[in-house]
């Protein structure tokens, strides 16, 4: 007899003023969605996308094919609903979301996935990412141009190549796998996996026997590292019950805040983690990560491919890209709001200064220095300004939170404004 326990937690993080992530923890369906689009739009996108998936909760299917088919269809329905909503209201124009959803029947896990939220499986000492990121850097990893380690810290890692709500046609990754007793499944947004390494996540999962503690510790780990983005985690544990316990009803616990606990031993002791675990998508093992760094030729090749992909994405009018087209970064020591994406490959830049601030690098806490050097992507201009406002509050030593005003985005006052569409072919 198997009991499935689950818990979810989400946190706005230290920089953003709104939480655009959403999650679902039900009886048999669990999901994470990471919305983008600014103001309320990102939140609307992620909540909208979860609805068709959540409607499958508790349903029983005739066979596995039907179950997986229904989950895939729910993700396609989610796309249709977000696309429709975005087209019907200018406030939601350009919104989108990731969606990583699992449906569990006994020990069977069905998974459907779009974007860069992730699913991981902890089995004994082995911790494996079981989803592929639909990101620019993952494509470069697949091409052998970047190692997984390089991708994990790559400044352009947040650029996604597939999302819910972008276009009518949607390609959905899906897989089914068999869980074993004591397995732990983690679903999470990139607000966790950006600041917290796979090794650290696995260490945390192995350090406590309590789901509540584990979700809190994962969120805390992201917060300790500056949490530049919304953080969402869902943990699902497959627990083998003895005859005595089997008489008890199944428990499913949902929380967005730590509450009471009460669980059994669930996580196996820690062991060594392979370079990136071993991926199993569709039952196939991914190639092992390279041990040595790429050669100069490979790096240049990677740059060429990256530029080609970006140009393709921009030319194709990827709304997801434009929706993330402001970021906070550095011009020398000065903190500046940039328009575009923080991509600077060789002579080609996809961003330009948009607004100077009165802050410098030394004004912000050390843990944000790396974030600023890489460029902190914002949902929109107001979001970028809020990031700056949070820095300013920090610099002033004030506890006052940034004003939550939703003032309309003003027209750029700089007369030297650029063409609003990035021109990736211009040096
Ligand atoms: Ca995110």
Image (spheres, helix red, strand yellow):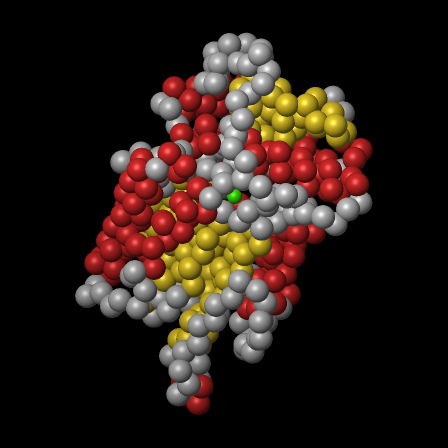
Rendering coords of residue 7 (x, y %): 50, 66
Residue located at (53% from left, 14% from top):
418
Residue located at (41% from left, 24% from top):
313
Residue 18 seen in the current view: yes
Q: In front: 385, or 68?
A: 385
Rendering coords of residue 124 (x, y %): 53, 64
Query: Is 323 drawn above or below residue 212 in the view shown?
Result: above
User: Where's the N terminus, which quadrant?
Assistant: bottom left
Query: Is 265 drawn above or below residue 348 in the view shown?
Result: below
Q: How many marks?
A: 0
Rendering coords of residue 207 (x, y %): 64, 65
Q: In front: 246, or 115?
A: 115
Residue 236 appears left or right of 231: left
Residue 203 seen in the current view: no
Q: In front: 15, or 281?
A: 15
Which residue is the extreme one toward the bottom? 244
Residue located at (46% from left, 65% from top):
236
Residue located at (58% from left, 12% from top):
415
Q: In front: 290, or 325?
A: 325
Residue 131 appears left or right of 328: left
Rendering coords of residue 303 (x, y %): 52, 20
Query: Is 151 drawn above or below residue 62 in the view shown?
Result: above
Query: Is 393 drawn above or below residue 327 in the view shown?
Result: below
User: Where's the C terminus, which quadrant?
Assistant: top right
> Which picture quadrant has residue 356?
top right
């Amino acid at each position: 007899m198997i009991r499935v326990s689950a818990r979810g937690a989400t946190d706005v993080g230290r920089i953003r003023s709104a939480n655009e992530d959403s999650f679902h923890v039900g009886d048999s369906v669990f999901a994470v969605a990471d919305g983008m689009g600014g103001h309320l739009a990102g939140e609307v996108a992620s909540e909208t996308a979860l609805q068709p998936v959540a409607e499958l909760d508790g349903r029983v299917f005739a066979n596995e094919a039907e179950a997986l088919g229904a989950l895939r269809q729910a993700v396609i329905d989610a796309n249709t609903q977000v696309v429709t909503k975005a087209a019907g209201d200018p406030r939601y124009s350009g919104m989108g979301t990731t969606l990583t959803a699992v449906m569990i029947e006994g020990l069977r896990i069905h998974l459907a996935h779009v974007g860069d939220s992730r699913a991981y499986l902890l089995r004994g000492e082995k911790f494996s990412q079981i989803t592929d990121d639909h990101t620019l850097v993952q494509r470069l990893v697949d091409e052998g141009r970047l190692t997984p380690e390089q991708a994990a810290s790559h400044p352009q890692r947040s650029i996604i190549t597939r999302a819910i709500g972008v276009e009518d046609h949607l390609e959905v990754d899906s897989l089914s796998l068999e869980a074993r007793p004591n397995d732990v499944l983690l679903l999470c947004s990139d607000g966790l996996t950006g600041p917290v390494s796979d090794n650290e996540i696995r260490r945390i999962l192995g350090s406590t026997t309590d789901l509540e503690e584990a979700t809190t510790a994962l969120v805390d780990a992201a917060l300790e590292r500056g949490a530049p983005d919304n953080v969402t985690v869902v943990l699902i544990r497959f627990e083998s019950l003895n005859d005595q316990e089997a008489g008890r009803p199944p428990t499913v616990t949902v929380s967005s805040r730590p509450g009471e606990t009460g669980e059994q031993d669930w996580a196996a002791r820690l062991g060594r983690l392979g370079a990136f675990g071993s991926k199993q998508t569709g039952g196939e093992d991914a190639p092992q990560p390279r041990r040595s760094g790429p050669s100069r030729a490979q790096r240049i090749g990677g740059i060429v491919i990256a530029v080609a992909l970006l140009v393709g994405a921009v030319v194709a009018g990827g709304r997801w890209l434009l929706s993330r087209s402001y970021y906070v970064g550095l011009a020398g020591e000065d903190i500046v709001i940039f328009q575009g994406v923080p991509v600077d490959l060789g002579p080609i830049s996809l961003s330009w200064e948009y607004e100077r601030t009165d802050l410098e690098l030394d004004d912000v806490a050390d843990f944000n220095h790396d974030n600023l050097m890489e460029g902190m992507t914002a949902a929109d201009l107001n979001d970028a300004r809020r990031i700056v406002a949070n820095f300013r509050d920090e610099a002033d030593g004030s506890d006052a939170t940034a004003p939550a005003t939703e003032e309309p985005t003003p027209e750029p006052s700089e007369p030297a404004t650029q063409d609003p569409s990035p021109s990736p072919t211009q040096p």
